[in-house]
Structures are given as structure tokens and as C-alpha cells.
Amino acid sequence: MRQCLRVAGGGMLGFVVSQLMGWNYGVFFTVFPMFLLGMVPILNGHIVRQFLANVSINVLEVSLVVGLLKHMPVVMTLVVMGIFLFRFNLMAKGPLFLFGANGVLTLSILLHFASYPNVDLSDLLACNLVASLLAVFIAMLMHTLFPDVEARKPPPRITKSSSQIRHETLIGGLTATLSFVVFQAFDLQGSLSAQMATILVLFTLGYSGARVSAAKRAVGTLLGCNLALLMQLLLYTQSHHFLLVVLFYWLGLMLFAREHIHEGGGSGIGFGGMTTLGILFGQSLGPQQDLVYSALYRFSSMSVALALTLLVMACLHVVLNRWTPTRLPESSLP
């Protein structure tokens, strides 16, 4: 219950602050607290340093890559691939998993939107920076208000072979790069849910885990879309009453937070539902906005994106296992 209250309360606070302040890119303010409180059940100095170091480096990376290489798409793609491979290598090794995972997710979104000429790069990076700082403050507040009854035991360290680390690095980095290229080439600026889904399933660091994660992600997104539609139907013309919107949003987050915790964390049904609500409420909820279209479009685009992502990962999985330096151990094969 305490962890449910932390995750739902953090997501609600991010939404409330962004709406009251009228800040752009509300999705950053809704999703970042969920990520920090949901993907990591504890909060300490090491986690905070990883989270803040990541946002600082992200701002520098996006400024340099977009500012210097925007007119050279091939070179830009190669640099982005190098950045993704570096982050997935950190994730595969373990100790800096949060730094790598948050970096991959945030960087893919920032690079995609920063490449459009109508996007104010300064505003985009400023919102990302403010949202990250706010997420840390919200996480600290939630852990203070709803502390754990007992201290959590650290997760067991997993020993991996060099070939497994190379396999996980390449399958994650190459798939994330291809996702970036596709969303750039087809001008899919409005498909944020689909882009996030293609990145979140990569956090399992392998094809076998991604298959399970993708199925759960699809179910979570479908439930999140349907719940958002039900809330819009219940609110109807009263969506301008902010307290009612916040109450409905918090109740929805509590439902998905409970499922997320029962799943044991990770990007499953609960987390997929929470992030779907965060994106829909952060960007599409309002008396003059069509939440029905937004929900249906998000689910359909995400389903196609996940299917293509799994197809790419399956091909890479087979190719990498044919080469000894990147072959998975027998115990890790599906």
C-alpha cells in the first residue's frame, strides 16, 4: 500500500504541478516520477546521482548532436547509435542500469522531437531539466510521507559472461537506433506512446524477455486507453473541473500501481497502464481535445511498433547467436 501511494501520489503531483504552471511537454512531468518511483523501489544518493547526471548529460548530448549534425542525417544516426550502444552496455553490466535506462528512454524522445524545425529546442531541454529535478523532489517527498516498513534487501548481483554483455548491448543499441530512424523517416511526431513502447521493451535486455514484456505492455496500454476513455465519458463536459480530473487520474494510477507492484516491477501491465494514463492526461485531456481519437491512435500505433520491434529483435537474436563473441550462454537461450 505504501509503495502504491508513492507511485500514484508522485504521478499525480507531477501532473498537477505541470498543469497549474502551464508548462509544455506535460508527458515529462507525468512519466518521470512514475519511472523513478515505479522502476526503482528505493531512493538513495546513488540513484539520485544517476538520475540527475543522466539529465545533465542528455541536455549536452542533444544540444551537440542536433546543433552540429542535424544537416547530416547519416552521421547523426551513427553518433546516436554509438550513444545508445554505450548506454545499453552500462545496462547490461548492471551497477549503472538506471543511468543507462533513463538515458535511453529520455534521449530517444528528446532527439526525435528536437529534430523537428517547429520545436523550440531550448524549451524542450528546459522542460526536460525541470521535470527531472521535480521528479527527484517528488520522489524524496513520497518516500518521506510513505516510507517502507522494513528496509529492502538489495537485489542479487548477476554475473554475466562477456559474450552475453555484448549480445545484450548490440541487440538493445541497434534496435533503439532503428526505432529512432523509423520515427524520423516517417515523420511520426504524434506517436509518443509507440516510441516509448519500443524502448521500454528493450529494458529486458534480450529477445526472450522482450516477447513477454511486449505482450504485457500491449495489455497495459489497452487497459490504460480504455480507462482513460471511461474517465472522459464520466467527466464528459466537466473536464474543466480540475479537482475532478485529478481525483480520477489518481484513482487510475492507484489501480495500475497495485498491478505493477504485484508484478514485481519492470515494464509490465501495471507500468504500461500508468504511463498510458500519464501520456493521455498530460497531453490530450481537455474540453476541446479528442481523447477518444488519441487513445485509439496510441493503442493502434503502439501495437504496430511493438510487432515490428519484436521482429527486428528476433532477427538480431538469431544473427548474434551465430557468432561466438556475441552468443548467449545455453542457460539464457529461450
Image: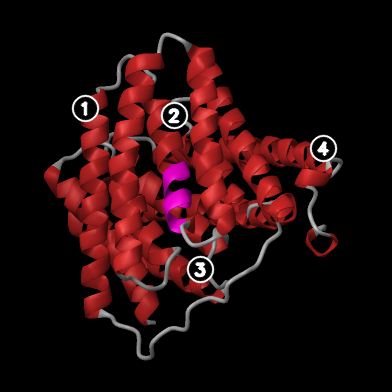
Residue span colored magenta = 98-105
Q: Disc 1 or 2, which lies upstream in sequence?
A: 1
- Sort mark 4 into few (<14), some (14-19) or many (20+) by Cα contacts within 10 Å: few
Magenta segment, prevailing SS (helix, strand or loop): helix
Disc 4 residue type? Val
Tell me the residue that label 1 is attached to. 122
Q: Disc 4 or 2, which lies upstream in sequence?
A: 2
Q: Is mark 2 on a helix, strand or loop?
A: loop
Residue 327 - label: none
Q: Which of marks 3 and 1 is in front?
A: 1
Tell me the residue that label 2 is attached to. 190
Q: Is residue 329 visible?
A: yes
- Sort mark 1 into few (<14), some (14-19) or many (20+) by Cα contacts within 10 Å: few
Q: Nearer the viewer, mark 3 or mark 4?
A: 4
Disc 1 residue type? Ser
Residue 302 covered by magenta stretch:
no
Tell me the residue that label 3 is attached to. 260
Inter-mark Cα distance, 1 to 4: 41 Å
